[in-house]
Image: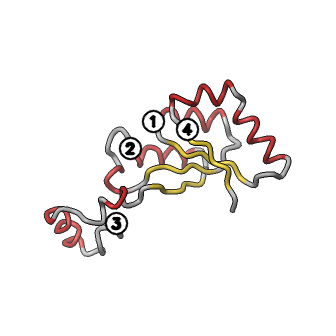
Amino acid sequence: MAFHYISIQIQNYQIFREQAAFETVRELKEEGRIRHIGIVFHDSPELLDIILTQHPEIEAVQIRFNYADWAEPPIESRRLYDVCVKHGKAVFATAPVKGGRLAELPEEAEKILRDMGGGSSTSY
């Protein structure tokens, strides 16, 4: 699938709206120049909910998604994921091993995962 992604944060969301970025992408899709519309999102679950409510044409959202960021502010992967599910959007993960930091954990953390018996630290 070919997605056209717009990277969104609170700092540029208003600019995108003023510059009609969402309308432009929607027109490109209608013209057949792109197949799908997605966003890369790096902000709060509350902002994501607003964006997906205002722009139902968005089909997919790429978020930071790993167990270390699941409930950790400011990322809160779980809440972002829940917003995507609420709106019926496909989710693509970025940073699944947190830039490699989850591949080489401190021994104490590694032991906790090992004791769970589910695989390597990166498999979680």
- Identified by mark 3, the residue type is Tyr
The numbered dot on residue 44 is 1
Q: Earlier in the sequence, mark 4 or mark 2?
A: 4
Q: Residues within 10 Å of mark 2 (few under 14, many from 20)?
A: many
Q: Which residue is mark 4?
A: 8
Pointer 3 or 1: first along the chain: 1
Spatial CA span between label 2 and label 1: 8 Å
Dot 1: element: loop
* Placement of 102 over or under 62, stated as above or below: below
What residue sits 35% from the left and 70% below the top?
Answer: 123
- Residue located farthest toward the right when viewing the structure as drawn: 31
Callout 3 crowding tier (Cα within 10 Å): few <14, some 14–19, many ≥20: some
Q: CA distance from mark 4 to mark 1?
A: 11 Å
Q: Is residue 78 above or below residue 44?
A: below
Q: Is residue 91 above or below residue 6?
A: below
Element under label 2?
loop
Query: In the image, what residue occupies the spot 79% across and 48% down?
Result: 29
Residue under label 2: 76
Q: CA distance from mark 3 to mark 2?
A: 17 Å
| Disc with the residue nearer the chain's start (4 vs 3) | 4
Circles 2 and 1: CB atoms closer than 8 Å: yes
